[in-house]
């Protein structure tokens, strides 16, 4: 009987709205991957990855995450990730031009996804420990230095899409941590200058060409402008209600490259149309809103910052991916949260949801104790 009540209490603390929204979005991704044909094996692999990720979600949801703010565990994992990213430059396997994978034979692992989430944990702890003296400029510099290490290691692969997301995660933390606005304005001005320097002296010619093609895809329709042109064709051909599941011609016939990962949003829009895109945007909006509410009820400033960081993590991935597919951002390799093919990012995303669920559970227990104490004192 006691085990029954423990199980009942465990599931009572699960935020099933968040879980089923994420699962629904993952199911949409599965429908797109299925359209490639069951013989390619991607569909089965993604189902296995999703099953493992869901299991991780429920396991992590039962954690007491308070130890993260009272130990050096986050910093140890951060330096471990630095070592992994550095090792990639020596022994990593290049896929789609980026040396960002460890090929272990029976499976491949991309530590980039882990590094992004570890940065969220690190910045949450850093700004939590310094919230009283957050007005000092040096906290922008120090937190930026931690971020810069990841940024450089990712840019050297080169994986500019992940490097860009790393930057947005840090900038999002700067915006929500309480740092004075004058420093943020200074950052924007400095960022504009550094971007110009980065473009002219750091980027390779083919990377510059991606940016030039982003501004005018028609200058190289069969080269660097090909991807975005085909993505736009797929988006437009879906019209209002789409062509139907497994009827998307752009990616089934091979015109749309990387349709299961980098351009899965365009593939989805072709099959589900504008109406389906609205439904997807609604689901992501409700999911992010729910995560914002959870983060605002943290037991302490650490949980609130961590929750906000996870919201930044998901929203950055979502808007960067959609922005690339719509032609608003230069083409870089980025995944759509919960939808794109790949086990590494799916595992980290459900892990992050589990952490947020643990925050939600702690917050409820905390407020319950407050009410009980008030009743006893009264």
Image: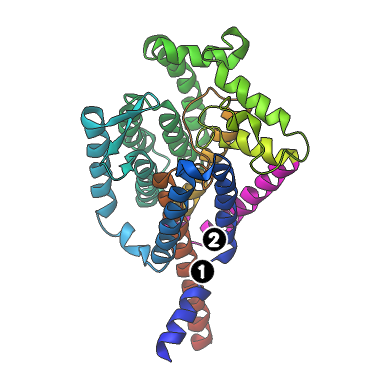
In the image, 246: left or right of 105? right
Q: Is disc 1 surrounded by few (<14), some (14 to 19) or many (20+) residues within 10 Å?
A: some
Residue 335 percent across, percent down from the top left = 49, 38
* Colour mapping used in the image: rainbow
**Magenta stretch containing residue 293, yes or no?**
yes
Quarter of the image with the N terminus is bottom left
Residue 356 percent across, percent down from the top left = 47, 59
> Quadrant of the rendered structure where residue 93 is?
top left
Residue 236 percent across, percent down from the top left = 72, 28
Q: Is residue 172 above or below residue 258?
A: below
User: Do the CB atoms of the residues marked 1 and 2 lie less than 8 Å apart?
Assistant: yes
Residue 14: mark in rendering:
1
Magenta stretch bounds: 275-304
Quarter of the image with the C terminus is bottom right
From the viewer's side, name the closer residue of 181 and 1.
1
Question: Dot 2 corresponds to which residue?
Answer: 19
Q: Is residue 20 above or below residue 223?
A: below
> Quadrant of the rendered structure where residue 123 is?
top left
Which residue is depicted at the point 78% across and 37% down? 240
Q: Dot 2: what SS?
A: helix
By secondary structure, the bulk of the magenta-drawn segment is best described as helix
**Mark pair 1, 2: CA separation:** 8 Å
Q: Earlier along the polypeptide chain: callout 1 or callout 2?
A: 1
């Amino acid at each position: 009987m006691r085990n029954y009540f423990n199980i009942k209490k465990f599931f009572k603390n699960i935020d099933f709205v968040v879980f089923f929204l994420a699962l629904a979005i993952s199911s949409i991704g599965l429908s797109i991957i299925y359209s490639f044909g069951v013989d390619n094996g991607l569909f089965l692999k993604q189902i296995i990855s999703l099953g493992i990720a869901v299991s991780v979600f429920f396991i992590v949801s039962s954690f007491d995450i308070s130890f993260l703010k009272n130990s050096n565990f986050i910093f140890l994992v951060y330096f471990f990730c630095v070592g992994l990213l550095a090792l990639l430059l020596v022994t990593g396997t290049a896929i789609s031009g980026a040396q960002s994978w460890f090929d272990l034979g029976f499976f491949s692992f991309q530590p980039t996804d882990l590094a992004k989430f570890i940065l969220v944990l690190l910045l949450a702890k850093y700004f939590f420990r310094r919230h009283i003296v957050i007005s000092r400029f040096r906290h922008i510099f120090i937190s930026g230095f931690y971020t810069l290490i990841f940024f450089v290691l990712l840019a050297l692969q080169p994986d500019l899409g992940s490097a860009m997301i790393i930057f947005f995660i840090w900038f999002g933390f700067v915006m929500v941590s309480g740092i004075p606005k004058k420093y943020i304005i200074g950052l924007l001005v400095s960022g504009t200058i550094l971007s110009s320097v980065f473009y002219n002296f750091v980027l390779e010619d083919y990377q510059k060409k991606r940016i030039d093609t982003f501004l005018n895809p028609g200058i190289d329709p069969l080269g660097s402008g090909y991807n975005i042109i085909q993505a736009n064709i797929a988006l437009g051909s879906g019209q209002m209600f789409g062509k139907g599941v497994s009827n998307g011609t752009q990616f089934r016939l091979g015109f749309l490259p990387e349709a299961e990962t980098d351009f899965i949003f365009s593939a989805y829009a072709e099959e589900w149309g504008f109406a389906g895109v609205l439904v997807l945007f609604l689901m992501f909006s409700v999911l992010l809103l729910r995560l914002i509410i959870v983060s605002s009820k943290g037991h302490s400033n650490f949980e609130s910052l961590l929750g906000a960081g996870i919201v930044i993590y998901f929203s950055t991935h979502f808007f960067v991916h959609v922005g690339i597919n719509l032609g608003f951002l230069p083409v870089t390799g980025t995944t759509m949260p919960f939808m794109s093919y790949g086990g590494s990012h799916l595992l980290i995303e459900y892990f992050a949801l589990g952490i947020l669920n643990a925050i939600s559970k702690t917050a409820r227990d905390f407020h319950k104790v407050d009410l009980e104490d008030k009743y006893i004192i009264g």
